């Protein structure tokens, strides 16, 4: 997917939920697939201790070579394991990359080695945020994600600081300007607090995000429900598009309101969001 495809209508669906599963737990891979998550992430980075990095990479490789599709969060470009991770992903055509602590230099390095392989740029540092506009325009970047926990540490902010919303808005606008899908928000670490997750998702949506990273299968249902359009929005959008098609005009009245091009574009976007998502995104 190129940077312009989402803006031009080339993406038929919007992935809402990305579920992490540790790369050293292959027994959980299939369970993650059945969780309802739009995409699973085989994590070779934070979830895996140094002593298990090689075995985690091997487990991910075996599973992907069996024809499965997933995002792989590789270790960073400054790590001992980066080259091995990149080589493994190169051998698995159905693997997409999530690059931690992404900035222009590191993303460019990955894409130089893996041309045309989609890269999700995980922004976890102040330096990465400062380069968001430039980074989002790099051909091969498929989406931006926000690593809120690491970013909080790097920015020396208190946990839950409202300043994180400033970063979210920057990432949302950088994505929009580059024609990328809305960005993916970071994790909610409170696994047993339903209201906290709902609140964080709603906040994320209000700042222009379109998905969220999940660390437990039980978070997936809530994330999918709140990032997708509501039933009322879907009914409205279908009504708008049907009325415009029937009238054959660019400006009409619908339910007592004027409908023109920007409103039609929003209705079209809502219907695209509603299109079902599958995990079989990449042909291999």
Image (cartoon, rainbow, N blue to C red):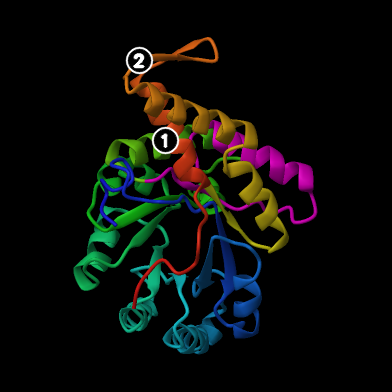
Q: Determine whether 84 is above or below 3 in the image.
A: below
Looking at the rendering, which quadrant does residue 115 occupy?
bottom left
**Residue 21 x %, y %:** 59, 72
Q: Specify start and end residues of the magenta stretch as a single range.
A: 181-210
Q: Are circles 1 and 2 on residues that touch, CB within 8 Å?
A: no
Q: Position of residue 35 (x, y in %)?
A: 66, 66
The one nearer the camera, 250 or 174, is 250
**How far from the left and from the top, in percent, is residue 82?**
36, 76
Answer yes or no: is residue 127 visible.
yes
Q: Which element type, helix, strand or loop, lies under badge 1?
A: helix
Which label sits on residue 268?
1
Q: Is residue 75 magenta?
A: no
Q: Position of residue 51 (x, y in %)?
A: 54, 86
The quarter holding residue 202 reads: top right
Mark 1 or 2, closer to the camera: 2
Tell me the quadrant of the picture where the N terminus can be found.
bottom left
Q: CA distance from mark 1 to mark 2?
A: 15 Å
- Residue under the point 69% across and 64% down: 217
Label 1: how many residues lie within 10 Å, few (<14), some (14-19) or many (20+)?
Answer: some
Q: Secondary structure at mark 2?
A: loop
- Decide: is 267 above or below 88: above
The quadrant the C terminus occupies is bottom left
> Is residue 189 left or right of 176 when viewed as pictured?
right
Is residue 188 part of the magenta span, yes or no?
yes
Residue placed under numbered mark 2 in the picture: 251
- Locate residue 118 relative to residue 263 in the image: left or right: left
Q: Nearer the viewer, residue 115 or 256?
A: 256
Q: Is residue 160 visible?
A: no
Task: Name the foreground residue: 167 vs 258.
Answer: 258
**Who's the residue at 38% across and 79% down the image?**
85
- Mark count: 2
For the point 44% across and 30% down, which residue is it? 241
């Amino acid at each position: 997917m190129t940077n312009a495809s989402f803006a031009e209508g080339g993406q038929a669906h919007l992935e809402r939920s990305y579920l992490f599963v540790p790369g050293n737990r292959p027994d959980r891979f299939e369970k993650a697939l059945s969780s309802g998550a739009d995409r699973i992430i085989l994590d070779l980075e934070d979830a895996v201790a140094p002593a298990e990095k090689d075995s985690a990479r091997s487990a991910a490789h075996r599973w992907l070579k069996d024809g499965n599709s997933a995002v792989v969060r590789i270790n960073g470009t400054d790590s001992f394991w980066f080259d091995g991770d990149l080589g493994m992903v190169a051998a698995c055509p159905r693997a997409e990359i999530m690059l931690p602590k992404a900035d222009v230099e590191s993303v460019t390095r990955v894409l130089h080695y893996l041309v045309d392989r989609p890269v999700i740029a995980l922004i976890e540092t102040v330096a990465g945020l400062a380069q968001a506009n430039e980074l989002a325009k790099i051909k091969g970047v498929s989406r931006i994600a926000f690593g809120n926990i690491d970013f909080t540490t790097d920015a020396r902010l208190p946990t839950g600081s409202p300043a994180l919303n400033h970063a979210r808005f920057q990432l949302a606008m950088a994505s929009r300007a580059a024609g990328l899908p809305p960005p993916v928000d970071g994790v909610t670490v409170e696994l047993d607090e339903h209201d906290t997750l709902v609140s964080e998702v709603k906040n994320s949506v209000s700042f222009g995000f379109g998905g969220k990273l999940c660390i437990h299968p039980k978070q997936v249902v809530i994330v999918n429900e709140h990032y997708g359009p509501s039933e009322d929005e879907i009914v409205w959008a279908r009504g708008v598009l049907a009325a415009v098609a029937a009238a054959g005009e660019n400006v009409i009245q619908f339910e007592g309101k004027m409908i023109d091009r920007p409103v039609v574009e929003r209705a079209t976007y809502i219907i695209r969001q509603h299109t079902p998502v599958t995990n079989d995104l990449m042909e291999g």
